Image: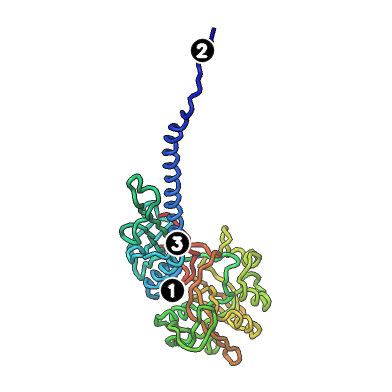
Amino acid sequence: MRRDTCSRTRPGNVIPVAAIMCVFLVGMVAFAIDTGYVAGTRTRLQSAADAGALAGCEKLVVWPDQAIPEASARAECKKFAQANENLTIRDTDIRLLRYDPMAPAGSRVSSAWSITSPPNACEITMRRDDLANGKLPLFFAPVLGKNSADVRARATAYIMPAKGILPGAPMLPYAVQVDYYFAACGQTRTGVDGKTIDTMDNWTVRPDGSVVSGPDGIKEIVLFSDTNNKPGNFGSLDIGSSQNGTPELDRQILYGPTAEDFQNSDFRDKVAADGALYIPFIAGGDSGMSTSVKSKFEQIAGSSRIVPLYDVVINPGDNAQYHLVTYAVVTITQVDFTGSPKKLWVQPARLSTNRVVASDLVSTPAYGVFTPPRLVIP
């Protein structure tokens, strides 16, 4: 008797199954390739937008009464964005904004700004769509009827004025009379001698920090005064020990005050719980100047430094007490300690550093002192 088997060989049965599966596999591979291509393009656009927003934002650092550098901020934003991704950027895709990180969510960004409420944020949109650069062509999606994809990336960066100084900040252990700083900014002010403060424009600070003769459109003032028996417009501060000498001044001129200076028993009562030095405060000092620090000032010529500004000084000489009302940034352009009085030429400048505490947009901030720019999702 022959026994029937329930299974028989059927050659070729797997071929139609494989053919059907291949359709799905090819579709999945095609989807993965096109999706990866779109994602990679979006990542490159985002990197370019981030670079542009950060660069444009830094150009918004200004000092009092300075015109809003709208054109240069836009140009810098576009320059750095296109350096990363060489695409057309529409003018309307770059916006200068006013951003307040301390405002309630949903009300932190405003497109309204003025010279009294200047912009502090830069936004840029990079795009591959019908508005600019054309849509991104796809490889396999046309089989499914989709030939291209819109790809966009947006970045916003902001910068904040400072209100407090942290150890390690590039701050000089010297105070400048506030009216002289504002005179250099273009305002008409009266000096310690009762006369209108004179300004000049004799020096140019190059981007590399070198100083050369010739105007650069930024006014200079001369620090120290030739008035007899009166405090001048500039003097040293005891940041740290009340017995600060030349070694401490030399170090602080070059590198700024340290945490040890802030925590010195003669000074620590002026420092807040967060370790920052906020204005206003009163500090002792000396309205004179030692020629021994001349070489240190010459070393930092062309570099930006933070200086405290005072409105009133009590007592002359090494008994001086300065009432410090805010901070500002200056660049030293020329040093001359050969005559009497000694002279130091400075001009207003800008500086961003992570060794400061951010202010809000309502309080009176430091002038020309800013935090580093930061990216944010509004």
71 or 179, nearer to the observer: 71
- What residue is pinned by disc 2? 4
At x 38% / y 69%, what residue is drawn? 74
Tell me the amino acid under the disc marked 2. Answer: Asp
Report if residue 334 is visible in the image: yes
Q: Residue 101: image x %, image y %? A: 43, 57
Work out whether mark 1 precedes mark 2 in sequence or the reverse, and give the earlier one.
Answer: 2
Q: Quadrant of residue 267?
A: bottom right
Discs 2/3, front = 2
Could you tell me which secondary element the residue under label 3 belongs to? helix
Discs 1/2, front = 2
Numbered circle sitting on residue 48? 3
**Could you tell me if the residues under marks 2 and 3 are in contact, i.e. CB atoms within 8 Å?**
no
Q: Residue furthest bottom?
A: 339
Is the residue 146 above or below the residue 244 in the image? above
Q: CA distance from mark 3 to mark 1?
A: 29 Å
- What residue is pinned by disc 1? 63
Is the residue 115 above or below the residue 11 in the image? below
At x 50% / y 76%, what residue is drawn? 312
Q: Residue furthest left?
A: 130
Q: Residue 351: image x %, image y %? A: 50, 71
Discs 3/1, front = 3
Report if residue 364 is visible in the image: no
Work out whether mark 2 precedes mark 3 in sequence or the reverse, and give the earlier one.
Answer: 2
Disc 3 residue crowd, few under 14, some 14–19, many 20+, Cα 10 Å: many
Tell me the amino acid under the disc marked 3. Answer: Ala
